[in-house]
Image (cartoon, helix red, strand yellow):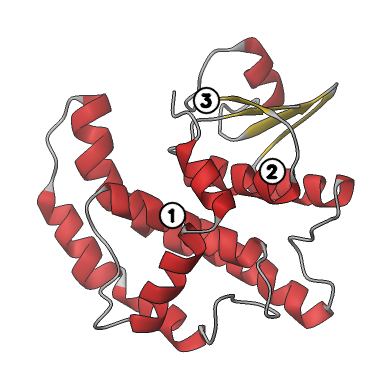
Amino acid sequence: MKLYGTSLSPFVRKVLVVLAEKGIEAKHVPLRFHDPDPRFRAASPFGKIPALEDDEFRLADSTAIIHYLERKHPEPAMLPAAAQDLGRAIWFDELGDTELFPLLVKPFVQRVLRPQLMKQPCDEAVVAKCMTEELPRPFDYLEGVIDGPFLVGGAFSLADISVATGFHNLHLAGEAVDAGRWPRLASYVAGILERPSFQTAIAARQG
């Protein structure tokens, strides 16, 4: 099994966490998106990361890959069994992918990707607007629904992986959740990112 994609990507990190939680052996190939590698492009025809190669089976998209791994290696479960818990886990996965990621990545793009990879200056106005005007709404929501160490069913799941993964990129940009304003969210994020599986994913090769 091979997983393609740099660990700088929150979406690649999602799959790396699941691989670590389930103890699945996989070769990590830390390519960036749109890499011309032919085996990667066979698994991801549109050049997006992550992509998975498992013998002759190929698949792209973090959520699709995780559902595949869940069926092939069901223990420990990353998706709850109860109907309502499953529905909420899928909701939080969507929240992480489509609502949180586009915002959490903005400071990272400005302070890390633009100066280091694109050789362009950081626009601090974009960072300031994101932190003061855009992120408070989802942060307020999460502060209101967090009531313990995990989001769904009292157990670590895809919900926690998807919501927490982008916060590492926020930290790489020198920003963090204001614990005075959002104490539950700050404590929750710190706890999830400290899990051994997340630490393994964070330490994986970037490129």
- Of labels 1 and 3, earlier in sequence is 3
The N terminus lies in quadrant: top right
Image depth: mark 1 or mark 2 in front: 2
Say what secondary structure mark 3 lies in. loop
Can you tell which mark lies on residue 127? none
For the point 11% across and 55% down, which residue is it?
A: 125
Give the amino acid type for the residue marked by disc 2 in the picture.
Leu
- Of labels 1 and 2, earlier in sequence is 2
Judge whether residue 138 can be spotted in this image.
Answer: no
**To which residue does mark 3 refer?**
30
> Residue 163 location in percent, x, y?
51, 64
Give the amino acid type for the residue marked by disc 3 in the picture.
Pro
Location of residue 141 (image quadrant): bottom left
> Residue 124 location in percent, x, y?
11, 51
The C terminus lies in quadrant: top left
How far apart marks 1 and 2 lie (CA) works out to 18 Å
> Residue 57 location in percent, x, y?
83, 27
